[in-house]
């Protein structure tokens, strides 16, 4: 196969939504229907089965929420899929936003009983800004749900995107029986399986097929037919161009936990989702078929597999062909590095990979100098600047109660900072050695504590810090200039890890006050990017 053929068969996408809409459940079911696992769900995590749940961290299992994104690569029907399950909770949104830079389309999951929730709306906005095509899965139709027409209306009204129902629910709640595929005019009636572990048995037939008709009560049947007629009257057709431009979203109804409508989503998605395309960086267009290899690191994660206590840099390949052992230019260090330990990823499992193509996400092990956002390429002129940065809004001291474990504590903290889970700040003119941690949300502190303990054997204790706002000062400010600043009560000057000065404020009001009293000192919500970045 040549590179163009390889690119055309790749689909790289993220699953996004508000917490709890069913992203991880849907991910597992896509693996089941994609043939990547035999049994879906928690059963797979048990012994003797391949451990494939996409939530791999101990803490995720305990809390039942995703706290980190997961990469799963598998082949299905002639396609190579790179699927990224993301966490919904806003405290982990930095990870989710980074993942969005690495994908070519997204599946947006909506809880049909709740409609569009706040976090879905925010993530949608990011996708729209990036022009990422969006496919919608209306999940949990097996529970009392909002009227399907009202759900479509909500997409248009709240998100301002056109909605085209590809399939339509037949019944809802306890009476949810299946979906009508509007592309083929066939009804798919499913049966529930225990725990949804296996594919749901399905019978397929036209609306007038007696075998199908006989399975539906009159009310459900009539309501469905009536709604379908209404949709036909509206006369909309599937518009691929509008979908690819992010102006319209194909909508699929179903229930991930019961495996209803999952196959139709998978097949419909693959039919219409885009293959990797060009990226524009600094005015230059880099086509995936460009013979020079290029990619960027969008995530770093340590200790994914207790068997290999090491650190993986996740790279999205953007152009050219990746070959194991190739030598590339590393943007941050401006040095040549040889990439010999490359892996394809499936949750916490990994396998050596010898070659990869645009669209693929690969894991590189053994490069301590790699950081989030770095470009790796055989053409040093290519430099990606994809990674969004977030301003921390939660601050806390982290104490080490056990001085004998000082080394583990330090090492663990440094590792987690490299992953971008948290930042550390150091108060100016302070004798206190306790690091002040800064994060997007407080749940990240909990993750830090948990991982310090389980991965590094270091206990820790949090102590609340009195600030909620951080602003960066001009990086070139001298010590005497810092001394001369007039600080509002309760605020403090500190330094980030790059020694850039910041001011910590107790609230927005205090930050505004500073701006008024120090008119010539511009504040910024993020560090001013250095040349290396
Ligand atoms: N009734 C019903 N429940 C579902 C369905 N799909 C998922 N759930 C349940 O919804 C809950 C949340 O599911 P997850 O898949 O963990 O949700 P998530 O979107 O990955 O959550 P975060 O990653 O924490 O944001 C679980 O209890 C699931 O069993 C469905 O189709 N019907
Ligand atoms: Mg999840």
Image (tube, rainbow, N blue to C red):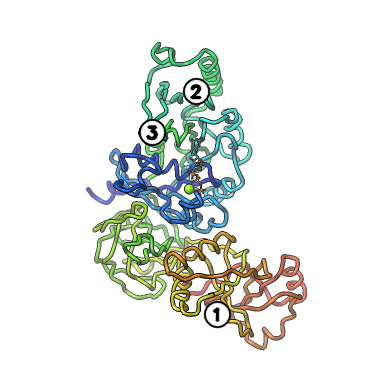
Q: Give the answer, above or below, for where 489 lies relative to 451.
A: below
Mark 3 Cα-neighbour bin, 10 Å: few <14, some 14–19, many ≥20:
some
Q: Give the answer, above or below, for where 326 lies relative to 45.
A: below
Q: Give the answer, above or below, for where 162 lies relative to 207.
A: below
Identity of the residue furthest to the left in this view: 1
**Disc 3 on helix, strand or loop?**
helix
Please identify, in this view, whether the residue under mark 1 or under mark 2 is nearer the observer. Answer: 2
Q: Quadrant of residue 148?
A: top right
**Disc 1 on helix, strand or loop?**
loop
Q: Is residue 218 left or right of residue 335?
A: right
In front of the other: 280 or 519: 519
Residues at circles 1 and 3 in contact by the CB criterion of under 8 Å: no
Q: Is residue 450 left or right of residue 392?
A: left
Pointer 3 residue: 263
Q: Give the answer, above or below, for where 282 lies relative to 42.
A: below
Q: Is residue 113 left or right of residue 490?
A: left
Q: Say which label, 1 or 2, has the lower sequence index.
A: 2
Q: Say which label, 1 or 3, has the lower sequence index.
A: 3
In front of the other: 289 or 524: 524
Give the Cα distance between marks 1 and 3. Answer: 52 Å
| Residue 239: percent from left, percent from top | 47, 33
Mark 2 Cα-neighbour bin, 10 Å: few <14, some 14–19, many ≥20:
many
Give the Cα distance between marks 1 and 2. Answer: 60 Å
| Residue 373: percent from left, percent from top | 45, 65
Q: Say which label, 2 or 3, has the lower sequence index.
A: 2
Pointer 2 residue: 170
Q: Is residue 107 left or right of residue 325?
A: right
Pointer 1 residue: 499
| Residue 256: percent from left, percent from top | 45, 36
| Residue 196: percent from left, percent from top | 41, 34
In front of the other: 16 or 346: 346
Q: Quadrant of residue 340?
A: bottom left
């Amino acid at each position: 196969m040549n590179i163009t053929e390889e690119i055309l068969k790749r689909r790289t996408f993220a699953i996004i939504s508000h917490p709890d809409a069913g992203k991880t459940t849907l991910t597992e079911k896509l693996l089941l229907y994609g043939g990547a696992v035999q049994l879906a769900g928690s059963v797979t995590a048990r012994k003797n089965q391949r451990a494939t749940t996409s939530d791999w961290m101990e803490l995720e299992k305990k809390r039942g929420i995703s706290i980190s994104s997961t990469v799963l690569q598998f082949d299905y029907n002639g396609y190579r899929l790179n699927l990224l399950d993301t966490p919904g909770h806003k405290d982990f949104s930095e990870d989710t936003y980074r993942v969005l830079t690495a994908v070519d389309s997204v599946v947006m999951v909506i809880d049909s009983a709740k409609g569009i929730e706040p976090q879905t709306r925010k993530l949608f906005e990011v996708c729209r800004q990036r022009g990422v095509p969006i496919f919608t899965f209306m999940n949990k139709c097996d529970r009392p749900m909002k009227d399907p027409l009202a759900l479509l209306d909500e997409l248009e009204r709240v998100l301002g995107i056109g909605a085209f129902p590809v399939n339509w629910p037949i019944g809802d709640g306890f009476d949810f029986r299946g979906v009508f595929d509007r592309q083929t005019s066939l009804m798919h009636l499913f049966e529930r399986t225990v725990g949804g572990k296996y594919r749901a048995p399905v019978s397929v037939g036209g609306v007038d097929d007696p075998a199908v008709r006989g399975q539906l009560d009159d009310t459900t049947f009539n309501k469905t037919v009536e709604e379908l007629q209404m949709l036909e009257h509206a006369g909309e057709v599937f518009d691929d161009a509008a979908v690819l431009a992010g102006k319209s979203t194909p909508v699929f109804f179903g229930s991930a936990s019961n495996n209803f409508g999952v196959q139709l989503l998978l097949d419909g998605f693959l039919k219409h989702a885009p293959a990797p395309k060009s990226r524009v960086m600094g005015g230059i267009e880099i086509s995936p078929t460009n013979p020079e290899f290029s990619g960027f690191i969008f995530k770093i994660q340590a200790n994914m597999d207790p068997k290999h206590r090491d650190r993986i840099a996740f790279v999205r390949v953007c152009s050219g062909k990746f070959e194991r052992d190739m030598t590339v230019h590393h943007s941050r260090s401006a040095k040549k590095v040889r990439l010999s330990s490359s892996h394809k990823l499936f949750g916490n499992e990994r396998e050596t990979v010898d070659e990869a193509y645009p669209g693929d996400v690969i894991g590189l092990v053994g490069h301590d100098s790699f950081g989030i956002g770095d470009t790796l390429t055989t053409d040093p002129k290519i430099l990606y600047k994809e990674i969004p940065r977030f301003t921390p809004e939660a601050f806390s001291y982290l104490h080490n109660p056990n001085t004998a474990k000082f080394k583990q504590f330090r090492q663990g903290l440094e590792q987690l900072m490299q992953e971008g889970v948290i930042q550390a700040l150091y108060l100016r003119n302070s004798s206190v050695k306790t690091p002040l941690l800064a994060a997007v949300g407080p749940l990240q502190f909990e993750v830090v504590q948990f991982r310090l303990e389980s991965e590094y054997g270091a206990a820790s204790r949090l102590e609340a810090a009195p600030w909620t706002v951080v602003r960066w000062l001009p990086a070139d400010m001298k010590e005497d200039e810092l001394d001369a600043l007039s600080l509002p009560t309760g605020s403090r000057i500190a330094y980030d890890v790059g020694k850039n000065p910041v001011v910590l404020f107790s609230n927005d009001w205090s930050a505004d006050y500073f701006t008024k009293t120090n008119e010539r000192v511009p504040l910024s919500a993020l560090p001013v990017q250095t040349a290396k970045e």
